[in-house]
Image (cartoon, rainbow, N blue to C red):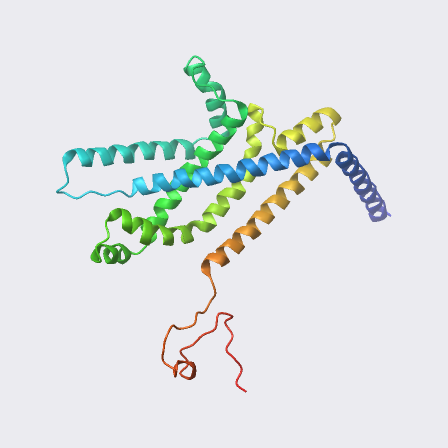
Amino acid sequence: MYSSLMLSRAGLVASNLGDDIAKLWREASPQYLKGARDTLILAVVATAVGCIIGLLCGILQTLKYSKSDFVLKKIFINVIKVVVRVYVEVFRGTPMILQAVFIYFGLPYLTSNALRFDVITAAYVVVSINTGAYMAETVRGGILSIDRGQTEGAMAIGMNHFQTMVKVILPQTLRNIIPQIGNNLIINIKDTSVMFIIGYAELFAAHKAYVGATYLYFPSAVVTMAIYLIMTVVCSLLLRLWEHFIDGPENFNLATTDTLALTSGMNNFPSGKRRRAR
């Protein structure tokens, strides 16, 4: 009796929830889809800019000098490292929502309105520099993870430091940090929700606006969560495809002019499958 009553009540609640979600979607789907679009654009653009910032900062953190270098060069490199380190620690050690408040409200206050960003610009600046701080450590770790023999080999054939980084170290580093780039993109898709604090009209702002007008908090939360989940899952799948594309086929044909290579077991096929013997 009790279990039947509970099942009946659960069915009624589910039916009401479905009706409320259907009503929400009929009335406010354009606002939710626009918020999702603005969220996705902000996350993608800010992640790309943040990766560029992180790449530059990561390279600067790995700069080296020898004992024979000029004193000014040593001082200059150390100052750069300290500045980058302060930037990384500040933006990794404080919440993004407070960074948004500082840049949008604090900068005009401190500069007597000489430095003021509009809402959209402030949102892009905040998410970009926050992502750059995390990517700086990712790039630094990726560079340091490359075997030192790679650098020594490049130097041995006459490459300078710039050529070694561009042609040898960074391509390998990029492949190693792709999962972290994807992770930052997914984090940014979710964390852009804090930009509503400065008035940026993203997906969470659309949720807050609809709830304020209708008080349908839970149905709106369900729809908002579903949209966030769809965006993050699709981005994860696309990033996995990118990883596989960069990796290339599992096996490669051996480049050789030896006509006996095919019968010697030295030849592999890109599909990973050997030809069947007839």
Question: In the image, residue 31 lies at what x, y percent?
Answer: 69, 32
Asked if one can make out residue 188 in the rendered structure from this viewpoint, the answer is no
Residue at the far top: name it: 112
Residue at the far bottom: name it: 278
Which one is in front, 18 or 142? 142
> In the rendered image of this protein, does residue 110 appear above or below residue 156?
above
Which one is in front, 187 or 156? 156
Residue at (43, 41) in percent of width and height: 51
> In the rendered image of this protein, does residue 94 appear above or below residue 185?
above
Asked if one can make out residue 48 in the rendered structure from this viewpoint, the answer is yes
In the displayed structure, does residue 49 sit left or right of residue 160? right
Residue at the far left: name it: 68
**Residue 113 placement: quadrant:** top left
Question: In the image, residue 124 lies at what x, y percent?
Answer: 50, 31
The quarter of the picture where the C terminus appears is bottom right
Residue at (42, 50) in percent of width and height: 177
Question: In the image, residue 153 lies at what x, y percent?
Answer: 24, 58
In the displayed structure, does residue 156 sit left or right of residue 249? left
Residue at (73, 24) in percent of width and height: 213
In the displayed structure, does residue 162 sit left or right of residue 188? left
Badge count:
0
**Residue 129 placement: quadrant:** top left
Question: In the image, residue 106 lies at what x, y percent?
Answer: 46, 19
